[in-house]
Amino acid sequence: MATCSRRNLFKLAGAGSLALLLPVGTRLGSAFAQEQLDPNDAQAKALGYVHDTTTVDEGKWASHSADQNCANCQLKQGGDGEWIGCAIFPGKLVNRNGWCSAWVQAQG
Ligand code: SF4
């Protein structure tokens, strides 16, 4: 009986520890959440960033071609969804079909 009580005590302690950790993990997750880059952000505008590479002002950005996008840029950082990280815009997500004038062909 004493062994059983001790075992139950350890189970309760373990469950309690997990319950305490869950909210912390949730908070950490939201702290690292990134938001989508606003094309009207000052740095984004300066670099001509757009969410859709087909909407680039070709007159203003002569180096642009329609096959250039964030998904095939050397400066992208992780992510394989619609929104990915970018070394130029830390803490923000860019659209994989987006483009800015810092575009560099990905190697490999
Ligand atoms: S540097 Fe590359 S990945 Fe980042 S916004 Fe510009 S084109 Fe997209």
Image (cartoon, rainbow, N blue to C red):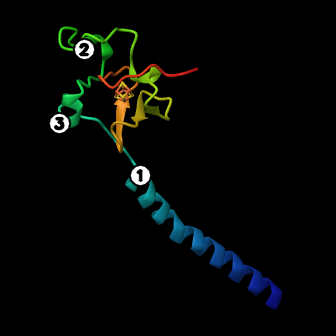
Image height of 100 relative to 4, above or below: above
Q: Which residue position holds label 3? A: 42
Neighbour tally class for label 3: few under 14, some 14-19, many 20 plus, Cα within 10 Å: few
Front tag of 2 and 1: 2
- Amino acid at circle 2: Val
Rendered image: mark on residue 56? 2
Image height of 20 relative to 3, above or below: above
Question: Earlier along the polypeptide chain: callout 3 or callout 2?
Answer: 3
Residue 14's image quarter? bottom right
* Residue pictured at 45% horizontal, 54% vertical: 29
In depth, the one of 27 and 35 nearer the eye is 35
Residue 15's image quarter? bottom right
Contact, mark 2 vs mark 1 (Cβ under 8 Å):
no
- Amino acid at circle 1: Phe
Give the quadrant of ligand 1. Answer: top left
In depth, the one of 64 and 30 nearer the eye is 64
In depth, the one of 4 and 19 nearer the eye is 19
Q: Secondary structure at mark 2?
A: loop
In whole angstroms, how far apart are the C-alphas of marks 3 and 2? 17 Å
Q: Secondary structure at mark 3?
A: helix
- Amino acid at circle 3: Ala
Task: Locate the C terminus by quadrant.
Answer: top right
Question: Earlier along the polypeptide chain: callout 1 or callout 3?
Answer: 1
* Residue pictured at 30% horizontal, 23% vertical: 100
* Residue pictured at 46% horizontal, 64% vertical: 23
Q: Left or right? Give the position of 67 relative to 20.
A: left
Q: Which residue position holds label 1? A: 32
Contact, mark 3 vs mark 2 (Cβ under 8 Å):
no
Neighbour tally class for label 1: few under 14, some 14-19, many 20 plus, Cα within 10 Å: few
